[in-house]
């Protein structure tokens, strides 16, 4: 494997809520203690679910990926990763209190700086924002944007509303202003069912439902006009899978041709907007391990600039060192591991 | 190309259309405020009867949430899938460079001229005092 690659989706985990205590204001720390809260985990990655961590990445008595040593010895070093973007998945987006959401986001981001970024020069991170209140989310972006080790703003694909709604636009304006792509990760604030049909019964259904949620998020961002208003905004879909993209490109463009007058600000084909403004990470790879099929998929995407290399560590998406999808055409590995991430994240090429 | 007399101007008042058949081809003749345009009655998308579609204006937006409406009646939507076409040019609104409905030259001539030029008028009786719509097919 090529050394020095840029891993666009790596998940350090918060050992427990106590680890964030030093980074909370006195008020929020007392509230947490008085309420007896010890964790802010959502149901996205249940501790014992096989997906949550690869068996050989489950340390005795600790959460997977919860120390810098684990991340170094299990991911950064063996995969010879040059730079990794940390997307911390913790239940900040689930809190109903906007202020508490903002307080926890601040604590989480400051913990990320002190415990990870300051200690390991290979790491970069996404700014976790309290999506419960876009104004507070913008405050958090403004507070941290000066630190170029933050290279992205992190949101979850399912929240209170489809992501294209104008309520969220101040977040996109701030992100565009600071050259920060919006990273949209699989997951939900779990206020609403994770499928349009209602709540599913099994974890398998929940995880498979992420792909249609990403499709809907893209439709919303495009049709509501986010990319017309913020044309240089990049959106990176994280842990989304990517084989569904060509069909969705075709489908949304097809309907746009007949219904363009509803969304007259969408002045070019949705497929073209996806190609210019949307990127997707490679793990989990949902393509069959066949070079011819993979090449056909890229032909259907109409671009080799859309995929960004990711490990999705510590989630169990591959075994051994099979970090790159099987069947990847020649020459594409370098592109997705270096060129595409650099083109997407302007801040990666800035000196810290 | 042979020119065919297809209708009198009084048959197609402003804002209306008439479907005519010339040399086996169905063609829609549209009157946009006194200017006449002809479109092949076959949508380049899937072959729907384009000229039976609703007419509308052109909606554009300098930014999301704004609706600039112009050219009322000059955009034709195919009844099958709603694709929009510019009646003046046949060009599709979403992809004017590569998708267009076939358009035909339309002119207006008085009855005397029609008779003098010996234009083809198989189905339309020609009288000196009338004005006629002529299509190049």
Image (cartoon, coloured by chain):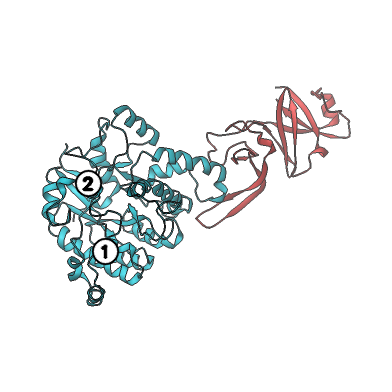
Chain colours: A cyan, B red
Q: Rounded to the nearest whole Å, what is the CA distance between mark 2 and mark 1? A: 26 Å
For residue A75, say whether it is visible.
no
Q: Residue at x 39, y 40 (%)?
A: A244
How many other residues sit within 10 Å of disc 2, few (<14), some (14-19) or many (≥20)? many
Residues A53 and A298: in front is A53
> Looking at the picture, does residue A37 appear above or below residue B42?
below
State the residue at coordinates (52%, 58%).
B65
Kindly identify the residue that appears in the image at 36 percent across and 30 percent down: A296
Residue at the spot of label 2: A7
- In screen coordinates, is A312 left or right of A200? left
SS category of the residue bearing label 1:
loop
User: In the figure, residue A36 lies in which quadrant?
Assistant: bottom left
Q: Nearer the viewer, residue A310 or A201?
A: A201
Considering every residue shown, the one lying at the far front of the view is A201
Of callouts 2 and 1, the N-terminal one = 2
Number of numbered discs overlaid on the protein picture: 2
Helix, strand or loop at label 2? It is strand
Report crowding for label 1: few under 14, some 14 to 19, many 20 or more residues within 10 A (C-alpha): some
């Amino acid at each position: 494997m090529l050394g020095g690659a840029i891993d666009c989706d790596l998940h350090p985990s918060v050992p427990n809520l106590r680890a964030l205590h030093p980074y909370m204001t006195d008020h929020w720390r007392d509230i947490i203690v008085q309420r007896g809260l010890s964790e802010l985990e959502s149901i996205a990655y249940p501790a014992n679910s096989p997906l949550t961590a690869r068996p050989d990445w489950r340390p005795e008595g600790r959460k997977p990926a919860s120390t810098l040593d684990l991340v170094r010895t299990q991911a950064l070093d063996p995969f010879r990763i040059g730079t990794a973007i940390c997307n911390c998945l913790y239940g900040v987006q689930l809190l109903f209190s906007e202020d508490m959401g903002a307080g926890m986001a601040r604590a989480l981001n400051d913990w990320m700086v002190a415990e990870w970024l300051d200690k390991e020069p290979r790491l970069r991170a996404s700014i976790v924002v309290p999506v419960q209140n876009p104004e507070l989310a913008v405050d958090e972006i403004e507070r941290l944007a000066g630190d170029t080790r933050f290279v992205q703003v992190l949101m979850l694909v399912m929240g209170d509303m489809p992501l294209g709604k104008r309520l969220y636009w101040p977040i996109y304006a701030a992100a565009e202003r600071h050259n920060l792509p919006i990273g949209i990760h699989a997951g939900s604030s779990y206020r609403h069912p994770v499928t349009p049909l209602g709540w599913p019964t099994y974890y398998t259904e929940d995880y498979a439902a992420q792909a249609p949620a990403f499709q809907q998020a893209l439709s919303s961002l495009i049709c509501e006009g986010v990319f017309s208003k913020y044309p240089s905004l990049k959106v990176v879909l994280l842990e989304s899978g990517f084989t569904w993209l060509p069909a969705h490109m075709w489908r949304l463009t097809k309907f746009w041709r007949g219904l363009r007058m509803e969304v007259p600000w969408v002045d070019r084909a949705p497929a073209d907007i996806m190609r210019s403004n949307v990127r997707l990470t490679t793990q989990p790879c949902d393509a069959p391990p066949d070079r011819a099929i993979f090449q056909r998929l890229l032909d259907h995407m109409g671009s080799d600039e859309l995929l960004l290399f990711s490990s999705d560590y510590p989630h169990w998406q591959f075994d051994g060192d099979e970090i790159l999808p099987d069947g990847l055409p020649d020459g594409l590995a370098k592109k997705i591991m270096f060129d595409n991430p650099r083109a997407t994240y302007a801040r990666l090429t800035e000196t810290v | 190309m042979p020119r065919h007399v297809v209708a009198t101007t009084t048959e197609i008042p402003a804002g209306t259309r008439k479907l005519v058949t010339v040399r086996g081809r169905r063609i829609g003749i549209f009157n946009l405020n006194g200017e006449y345009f002809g479109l092949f009655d076959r949508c380049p998308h899937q072959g729907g009867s384009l000229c039976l579609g609703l007419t509308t204006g052109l909606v554009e937006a300098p930014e999301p949430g704004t609706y600039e409406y112009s050219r009322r009646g000059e955009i034709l939507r195919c009844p099958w899938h709603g694709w929009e076409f510019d009646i003046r040019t046949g060009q599709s609104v979403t992809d004017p460079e590569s998708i267009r409905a076939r358009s035909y030259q339309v002119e207006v001539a008085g009855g005397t001229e029609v008779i003098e030029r010996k234009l083809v008028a198989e189905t339309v009786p020609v009288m000196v005092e009338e004005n006629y719509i002529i299509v190049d097919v």
